[in-house]
Each structure stands twice: as C-alpha cells, then as structure tokens.
Amino acid sequence: MKKTVKISQLQVNKDNPRAITEYMLDKLIDSILIFSDMLAYRNIVISKEKVILGGNQRFLALKAISEMDFNDLLDRLLVLDMYTDMHPDKQFEIQGYWEKWLSKPVIEVTIADDLTEAEQKEFIVRDNVRSGYDNTDMLKQHFDIDEIESYTGNVDQNLFDFNNRINDKDIENNPIGLNKLKCGYVVSILSEPELTFLMEQYNASVERNGSDEFFVREVLLCK
C-alpha cells in the first residue's frame, strides 16, 4: 500500500546493516536535489510502525534537506555543475519544487504491512544486496566520467587511462579530503582507520621534508 507521509513521522532503522559515509551522504543529497523525480520511481519502504525497511540512506538525505533553509539549499545548488549547466527554465523548475517541498516535507512510501517480523528482516538484507557488476566498457562508451562521479560519489578506477592521467601536472600534493583520497583522477572512499593512518603518514612526511610536496610520491606512489 502506498501512502504520503511527513518526513518527521518516519524512523530510521537502527538495525540496518548498510552504513553511509558523510561524503557519500553529501553526494546522495546533491543527487536528490538535482533529480528529485527519481524518488517517485524508488519508493521508501516502511513497516506499519513507520520504521524504514528499504531506503534508509534516501531518508537520511531527505531529512537533511528538510532541515535546510531555502537560501542555503539554493547556495548548494549553485556549486553543482549539473545544475549550473542546466537551462534556466529547468533551474527554476527545481527551485520551485524544493521551495514548495520545504514548506511541507512529505514523501510517498510503500507500507509493507503484510510482512511478518522475520520477513521484514529478510527484506532489509535482500534490499541491500548488490548482485550485479558494472560493465566498464559500456560506461566509458555512454557516460562521461565526471557525470558518473556526480551520480555515485566515486568512480571505478578501471574507467581511467592511467598511462595518460596518473602523471597529470595538476595532481594534488595533499589529496586527502573528507573521508576520501584523490589520486590523480581517481577518488576512493576511506574508512576511519584508513583516514587516520594516512593523516599520520602525511604529518610525518611534512615534518620530515618541511613541506607536503613529496607526500604523494612517498606514500601513494603516484609517480
């Protein structure tokens, strides 16, 4: 059964086995801001108690959007290339949608009120399983790498031509950012232990060399 409910009425599932980093959540927020129509085709699934069974990450993104001031939301859109490259009519359409939505933040959900508790647990696990794989040749042929990064938050390293790109003169000396590591054109998501380790190595490199210009060569071997 489908129903429209307020974001504030929904509860995140504390037992959800799928987590999301702050960086990836930011990417999901940007994706929803640009392409809100996708929400109509991928409903959040909830129990009759309004606990989320499928779509926890989308809920977190929508909850963050619901807490934004409209002007802050506009500022966020204005730094997204996909938005600034749009025709002004499309930009106004997006602005109008979110201005109206912020005044009444609701979402259409599917209520799985006929599932037993055991079936709900099974649904949560099955909903998080990704059985397929990306065909990198098809992605290279039909999609721009920057577009893929804007959709998903990261890019499979197999999409890059390392011989041409790894020696890019503009490569960052200190590529560590918000839970991500950028090596040339490749962005990898870091776990907290990985981020801590790399920051320790970075600080040691700066202390040893007096600057961070050797960090990439010493630690990442991006030569």
Image: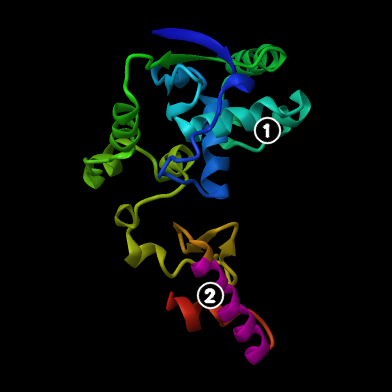
Residue placed furthest toward the bottom: 208
126 sits to left or right of 78: left
Q: Is residue 42 above or below residue 162?
A: above
Q: Which mark is residue 78?
A: 1
Q: Residues within 10 Å of mark 1 (few under 14, many from 20)?
A: some
Which residue is drawn at the image coordinates 43% and 70% (left, top)?
167
Helix, strand or loop at label 2? It is helix
Q: Which quadrant: the C terminus?
A: bottom left
* Percent of width and height locating residue 55: 44, 29
Closer to the camera in the image, 144 or 111: 111
Does the stretch in magenta take in 208? yes
* Percent of width and height locating residue 148: 41, 41
Closer to the camera in the image, 16 or 38: 16
* Percent of width and height locating residue 178: 60, 57
Number of the front mark, 2 or 1: 2
**Residue identified by numbered label 2:** 197
- Dominant SS in magenta: helix
Q: Which mark is residue 198?
A: none
Residue placed furthest toward the front: 117
Sequence order check: which comes first, mark 2 or mark 1? Answer: 1
